[in-house]
Image (spheres, rainbow, N blue to C red):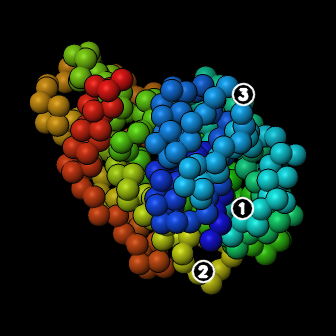
Amino acid sequence: MKVLVTGAAGFIGYHLVKKLIAAKVDVVGLDNINDYYSVELKNNRLKDCGINVNEHDVDYTSAEGNYRFLKIDLLDFERLLLLFQENSFDCIVNLAAQAGIRYSLENPRSYIKSNIEGFFNILECCRINPPQKLVYASSSSVYGLNTEQPFAISQKSETPINVYAASKKTNELMAHAYSHLYNFTTVGLRFFTVYGPWGRPDMAPFLFAEAIQSGKAINVYNNGDMKRDFTYIDDIVEGIQTVLKTEFSEKYQVFNIGNGKPVDLMYFIKCLENSFSRKAEVNLKDIIPGDIVSTWADTEALESTTGYRANTNVEKGVDLFANWYKDYYKQS
């Protein structure tokens, strides 16, 4: 199997690439390594996969030989198409995107460019050079104003309440059209609050850990009355790998991938306090426009189709994340 992973320097992309190259899969990764958050963290992820980036080169190969990394932006269609033409990819995993719900309130245009136009370029490359399968990142945020929980893929997802969610729902609709017209399989995975080692610094677990470790206050929105279906990164990666190996009877698929257990945000903070052996100082604030109060994944469809189910509880996951955080910043 030869697999292209976009967003390979990102949180989920890094973990997926690490697992695939360990399994001796032939992997090509790409990322534009933008400065939305720490470039140093992205470069360290790449380094951990055997890639030492510099300012000038755009094409790298790991010492093991089964991982090639390229600095490419999804908006550069010509370079992207050339990459598809030079390789015969069995599967594409599209994880490249402008992430972050709150940032979408400040800079919505970047989401249209990266998440919609960038994904369109991937679909066009797949139309011209069809893979067996395109797996792409969607999000639990597509459920928007839907209040029925747990969220199931049969429920409505046409009422997103922020531009990030709207861009992810657009991806699903675009994938449906392309899989129908051009006869290749597309699988959308609606991720539910992914956390773990090497995570994004703009996400709540990282911000909470940073505040607890440094003795600063944590801002907790909706006065702490929030629930999230926190899903540990290893479970997400195992789910993606299972999807890559599964033969689907239908060309278009969308699944929830989550832990299937909503967790009170204040309990998640309590787990972090236990892992850091420090009490958190909490500032309770009103909810931010575009934020969702509660998420809870119904994962029955993914389990019945592929046999996969997440199995890392939040106490274990938080401890693994906290241990990585302390070690990483101790070394830094």
**Above or below 304: residue 330:** above
How many numbered badges does the structure rendering display?
Answer: 3
Residue at image coords 65%, 54%: 28
**Camera-nearest label, 3 or 1:** 3
The quarter holding residue 4 reads: bottom right
Q: Distance between the residues labelled 2 and 1?
A: 15 Å
Name the residue carrying label 2: 248
Name the residue carrying label 3: 56
Residue at image coords 59%, 81%: 247
Please, what secondary structure does the residue beneath circle 1 have?
A: helix
Q: Is residue 150 visible in the rendered structure shown here? A: no
Name the residue carrying label 1: 175
Q: Position of residue 310 (x, y in %)?
A: 34, 64
Q: Where is residue 183 in the image (x, y as percent from the top left)?
A: 79, 75
Residue at image coords 84%, 60%: 85
Q: Could you classify mark 2 by the number of other residues whose Cα lies within 10 Å: few (under 14), some (14-19), or many (20 or more)?
A: some
Please, what secondary structure does the residue beneath circle 2 have?
A: loop
**Above or below 112: residue 214:** above
Under mark 3, the amino acid is: His
